[in-house]
């Protein structure tokens, strides 16, 4: 330029980023919410799968424990059943033995009765016949008494024992039959087992005075004495 200084303008460097578009695309992809959601979902699915696997392992382990416990219970149940069945059989046998023992210790024995009759004989009495009878009756449950004395009796078998003595009084004028009756009633065995002072009673009436066919000089009368022993009650 004439008459002045010339100034050369300052040049600025120009920078061109050839990867800008690719970087922008990558940044946009990195910030894409769908991708983040997929990653998060995949992580959650993985966690759920791991939890399911853990639960399956726990179930298998508990199932194994259950099977062991069930097998042990079956074994113990079999032993328990065997023991209870054996106890039931033992109880049944003991019950039968107890009933047999009760029957043997509470049965009515006739031998002591005959022995007592032999020891209680007196002169001028001739026993011609001795009859012992035993009857059994079954009783259903029933009540006896009333009010405060009411008692309930269960079913039972009742044994009734009766003794009958037929004899001759060879001295009817002395009423020896009455002395014989008194002697039987006061004899210790009969007094204890008949549980009453007048245990023997005259059954019917005295027979007529009869001449002894063997010795016509002798006369006699016949009579019968009866005793009823207390009932023996055996509960069923």
Image: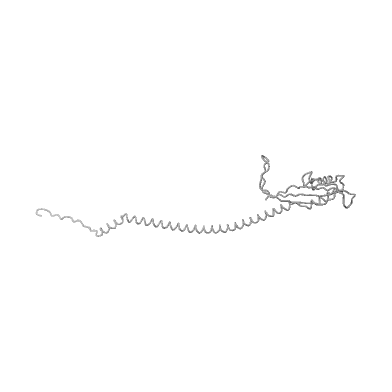
**x, y percent for residue 155:** 67, 48
**x, y percent for residue 173:** 87, 44
Q: Nearer the viewer, residue 160 or 106?
A: 160
Furthest residue in direction left, as rendered: 2
Q: Which of the image's four quarters has the N terminus? A: bottom left
Furthest residue in direction right, as rendered: 217
Q: Nearer the viewer, residue 9 or 189?
A: 189
**x, y percent for residue 115:** 81, 52
Question: What is the count of numbered marks?
Answer: 0
Question: For residue 199, which quarter of the picture?
Answer: top right
Q: Nearer the viewer, residue 69 or 146?
A: 146
Say left or right for 53 vs 231. left
Colour theme: one colour
Q: Nearer the viewer, residue 205 or 144?
A: 205
Q: Is residue 145 above or below residue 10?
A: above
**x, y percent for residue 71:** 54, 59
Say left or right for 44 vs 131. left
Furthest residue in direction top, as rendered: 147
Say left or right for 61 vs 21. right
């Amino acid at each position: 330029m004439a008459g002045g200084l010339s100034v050369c303008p300052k040049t600025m460097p120009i920078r061109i980023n050839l990867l800008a578009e690719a970087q922008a695309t990558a940044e946009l992809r990195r910030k894409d919410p769908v991708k983040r959601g997929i990653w998060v979902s995949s992580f959650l699915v993985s966690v759920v799968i791991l939890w399911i696997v853990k639960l399956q392992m726990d179930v298998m382990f508990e199932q194994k424990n259950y099977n062991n416990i069930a097998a042990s219970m079956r074994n113990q149940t079999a032993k328990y059943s065997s023991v209870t069945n054996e106890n039931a059989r033992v109880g049944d046998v003991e019950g039968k033995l107890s009933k047999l023992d009760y029957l043997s210790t509470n049965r009515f024995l006739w031998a002591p009765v005959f022995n007592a009759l032999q020891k209680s004989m007196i002169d001028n009495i001739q026993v011609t016949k001795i009859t012992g009878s035993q009857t059994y009756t079954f009783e259903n449950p029933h009540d006896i008494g009333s009010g405060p004395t009411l008692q309930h009796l269960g079913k039972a078998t009742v044994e009734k024992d009766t003794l009958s003595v037929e004899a001759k009084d060879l001295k009817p004028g002395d009423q020896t039959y009455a002395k014989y009756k008194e002697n039987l009633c006061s004899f210790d065995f009969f007094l204890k087992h008949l549980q009453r002072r007048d245990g023997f009673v005259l059954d019917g009436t005295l027979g007529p005075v009869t001449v002894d066919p063997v010795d016509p000089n002798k006369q006699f009368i016949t009579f019968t004495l009866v005793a009823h022993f207390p009932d023996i009650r055996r509960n069923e």
